[in-house]
Image (cartoon, grey):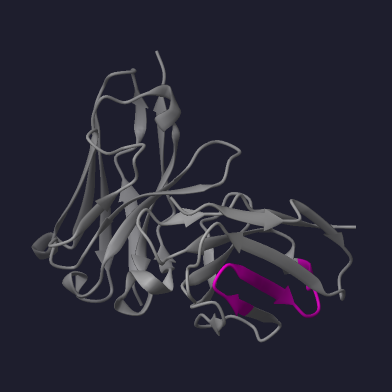
Amino acid sequence: EVQLVESGGGLVQPGGSLRLSCAASGIPFSTFSINWVRQAPGKGLEWISYISGSSGTIHYAESVRGRFTISRDNAKNSLYLQMNSLRAEDTAIYYCARNSLGTYYYGMDVWGQGTTVTVSS
Amino acid sequence: DIVLTQSPATLSLSPGERATLSCRASQSVSSYLAWYQQKPGQAPRLLIYDASNRATGIPARFSGSGSGTDFTLTISSLEPEDFAVYYCQQCSNWPQTFGPGTKVDIK
């Protein structure tokens, strides 16, 4: 059974940086593509980034492109999100989520518990 | 970007009743639509992928239908644990997008 555990959230000032991590266990990490999805307080879900198993394909939402960088280290079974130039509107719970059945066409079937990022002075 | 519209915003029903939730896309997403359930304080759970396929472990009372731009999630007979927020997600185009959600609450 695949498990995902996020870490690295916290309180950061506007303009600051934070690096989130997502640790995977249960099956070989390189076999699946994975995403970051966030949820602002009391709001809906927002997909923000995708990375394929080999890191060969990466996508970003327009709201984070140029500020956030997704990466993965398959040897360490870990996914990362480097967040720079943070804004108040980046305040959210950040989830990592695995794509279902090995393809981004089929949604996300395994989710972490989320890590909270608060951007405030 | 593809915009997803969900209706109604809130659905007030009693246990045992049938729930019908709608998701409409601003352009065709073929069958590449997923449905999720989210309860307070929890991560979303995948219910349906590829418009009509139940994810592993999802009860048969959940079913999905549709293609192109119009999709439906049906819960045939609501159980107490089904009262939650439901989101659709289009997986066809980048950026992938979610609908705003439908809250199913107890009448």
> Where residue B27 sits in the image (x, y, percent)?
51, 61
> Where residue A109 sits in the image (x, y, percent)?
43, 70
Q: Residue at x 26, y 53 (%)?
A: A59
Which of these two is toward me, A7 or A29? A29
Q: Residue at x 63, y 71 (%)?
A: B71
Q: Is residue B107 shown above or below B79?
A: above
When asked about the image quadrant of residue B21, the answer is bottom right
Q: Residue at x 79, y 68 (%)?
A: B80
> Where residue A20 sits in the image (x, y, percent)?
27, 42
Which residues make up the magenta segment? B65-80
Image quarter where the C terminus of chain B lies is: bottom right
- The stretch drawn in magenta includes residue B17: no
In the picture as drawn, the residue positioned furthest to the front comes out as B27
Q: Is residue A53 shown above or below B84?
A: below
- The stretch drawn in magenta includes residue B73: yes
Q: Is residue A27 shown above or below A108?
A: below
Which of these two is toward me, B72 or A11? B72
In the picture as drawn, the residue positioned furthest to the bottom comes out as B60
Q: Is residue A30 shown above or below B27?
A: below
Q: Residue at x 34, y 61 (%)?
A: A4
In the picture as drawn, the residue positioned furthest to the top comes out as A121
Q: Quick check: A26 left or right of B87? A: left
When asked about the image quadrant of residue B76, the answer is bottom right
Label count reads 0
> Where residue B45 sits in the image (x, y, percent)?
53, 66
When asked about the image quadrant of residue A89, the answer is top left
Q: Quick check: A85 left or right of A63? A: left
